[in-house]
Amino acid sequence: LPEAAELDRLRVVLVRTRNPLNIGAAARAMSNFGFTRLRVVNPYEASFREAQSAVGAAELLRSAEEFSSVSDAIADCSLVVGTTAVGHREIVHPLLRLEQGGRRMREHLGSGRAALLFGSENHGLSREDLSHCHWLLRIPTRAEHISMNLGQAVAVCLYELVREDSAARESVAETTERASGEDLERVDHALFEALAASDYIKAGADASTSEKARRLVRRMQLTPEDARTWTGMLAKMSARMRSGR
Amino acid sequence: LPEAAELDRLRVVLVRTRNPLNIGAAARAMSNFGFTRLRVVNPYEASFREAQSAVGAAELLRSAEEFSSVSDAIADCSLVVGTTAVGHREIVHPLLRLEQGGRRMREHLGSGRAALLFGSENHGLSREDLSHCHWLLRIPTRAEHISMNLGQAVAVCLYELVREDSAARESVAETTERASGEDLERVDHALFEALAASDYIKAGADASTSEKARRLVRRMQLTPEDARTWTGMLAKMSARMRSGR
């Protein structure tokens, strides 16, 4: 099993979950496999902390952190992974099968924090939610019946993360530190400012443009230092463009 | 994924299940992963076939076979495996972790039928139930919180049975096309121009500055399309900065 410190670096993030029983079930699976940090974003039921399904994990559920945006919920994470049942929306992110993605996440958890996002039971993660993700993960369900129950999907993903695979353990841990969600948001902001100042995008551009920019930034796989460099360069360009007007 | 014939050789056997929602959840997970044959032994609720939790698997649930003894439910199987949370009873059977046990089951399913038994939510499988088993399987939950929700335990076991070992080893990088040296040079040039126009770097900056910029661009791991996007954005910013002077 991974060390406690590694398990402690994962944030399970449940976004707009409708059924509080599923939040409780996620908490139970987390506790079964040794994970501790649950985050919820705009849950449908305010009283989710009392879900009876969190058998043996009531304390974990009570200490869940609540957020009003995905952006805030992943701010301290340097890897953000979204889960998807594919099929119902165009995928513009790299998509990994759980076997593969789980291995990548474990490597990352060796030194950095990661968030694993699960969307609502009906609609999954939105395009806006996905724009915060570095890549997406899919459980290898069959095409004719892709969509899993949320609590079961959480359990399967967490099992893959603690699964003992001698081959996986021999692999070299990823040593490069990655920029946090907060760092990346500063890059997003600086880039968006510069694009607006240059008329590359028009004032009042729609959400899909900023989502595109966000995905572009996530694909850069920035280190914290490179994120600072880009933020500084872009801010300087924006200042120059604004002053010249 | 294993072939349909192999999936078809597994019988998932739920013994004395109390909550019909768990039977429905098991049916759903079976359908997600391509298994078809559900058997129930003395379920607590006679009306389990109407469980709402069998989303997308109502037909599988309706066609579940009902038995009044474990002995009858496993009569046509040449391998019988019991699941256990250990701890609360003396184990007299060989006990395998899911990672190893799953491999053994898959080997068996290549040519023979197998039954995978899950006991009741409160008490698991009885000594009498276990006496029908060739060996036992345990999901690697932590000692302090061993016991999983039944539907989640079924999902995790079935995932292990369809899991593709080779998928974990596939390299992701190889599948993503990378920008050529030429593409990257265009990004270098556009970036350098923009940095100069913004006074982020001074005119006549030395070689080490342009090398730094080049390394920064190389660390972005750009695809050809992203390289074009960055070249275009930076050129636009440069044009704006130059025109404002």
Image (spheres, coloured by chain):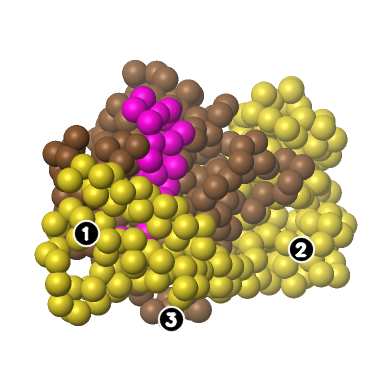
Chain colours: A brown, B yellow
| Residue B206 visible | yes
Which residue is under mark 3?
A: A170
Q: Nearer the viewer, residue B167 or B20?
A: B167
Which residue is label 2 attached to?
Answer: B2
Q: Position of residue B110 (x, y in %)?
A: 81, 69
Residue type at mark 1: give it: Leu
Quadrant location of the N terminus of chain B? bottom right
Q: Residue at x 38, y 44 (%)?
A: A214
Q: Residues within 10 Å of mark 3 (few under 14, many from 20)?
A: few
Residue A186, picture quadrant? top left
Q: Percent from the top left, x then y, of residue B181? A: 46, 75
- Please give the chain letter of the residue carrying mark 2: B
- The residue that appears at 14% across and 58% down in the rendered structure is B200
Residue beneath disc 1 = B195
Q: Find residue B64 and report its horizontal and vertical position in percent.
A: 81, 37
Q: Are marks 2 and 1 on the same chain?
A: yes
User: Does residue A8 sit above or below A150 in this rendering?
Assistant: below
Mark 2, other Cα within 10 Å: few <14 / some 14–19 / many ≥20? some
In the displayed structure, does residue A129 sit left or right of residue B68?
left
Q: Is residue B168 above or below residue A85?
A: below
Looking at the rendered structure, the kind of residue marked 2 is Pro
Residue drawn at x 76%, y 50% as measured from the top left: B34
Q: Tell me whether circle 3 and circle 2 mark residues in contact (CB < 8 Å).
A: no
Assess whether residue B79 is covered by the magenta stretch. no
Q: Is residue A214 left or right of residue B94?
A: left
Magenta stretch? A200-222
